[in-house]
Amino acid sequence: MPYTAVDLASHAEATLDELPEDGRREIMETIAAALVRPYSWPEPGGWRGALVFGPRSWVWFTAFLGGIEVIDLRWAVRCRTGWQVG
């Protein structure tokens, strides 16, 4: 069965909308990395979640039959005053 479905929790969707283009791109690549590794998913339908990390991002997700639901996500960028997390 191909794993192709990705749902975004409303909080994750709002966070994604607020990110700059390069942040959105990295988050989408991080989500894709999680999606193509179903062996690393928590048991579908349970209360467990999993983290996957990108170069400057992380995605927290849970699994369901056929895909994942992104519960939360973050992207960090270095600025003049330090690290900013979005």
Image (tube, helix red, strand yellow):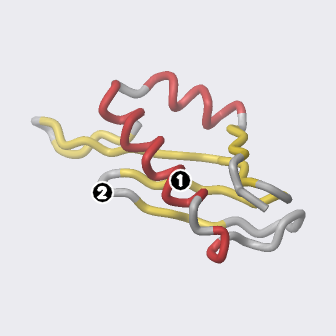
Quadrant of residue 47 within the rendered picture: bottom right
Disc 2 marks which amino acid?
A: Pro
Q: What label sits on residue 20 in the rendered view?
A: none
Q: Residue at x 73, y 72 (%)?
A: 42
Residue 56 position in % (x across, y down): 31, 52
Residue 59 position in % (x across, y down): 53, 53
Q: Residues within 10 Å of mark 2 (few under 14, many from 20)?
A: few
Q: Residue at x 51, y 23 (%)?
A: 17
Q: Residue at x 29, y 40 (%)?
A: 84
- The answer to whether 43 appears left or right of 3 in the picture is right
Q: Is residue 15 above or below residue 7?
A: above
Q: Is residue 55 above or below residue 25?
A: below
Q: Nearer the viewer, residue 74 or 5?
A: 5
Regarding mark 2 in the picture, which secondary structure is present there? loop
Disc 1 marks which amino acid?
A: Val
The residue wearing badge 2 is 55
Q: Are marks 2 and 1 in contact (CB under 8 Å)?
A: no
Viewport quadrant of the C terminus: top left
The residue wearing badge 1 is 59
Residue 83 position in % (x across, y down): 24, 45
Viewport quadrant of the N terminus: bottom right
Disc 2 versus disc 1: distance between alpha carbons?
Answer: 12 Å
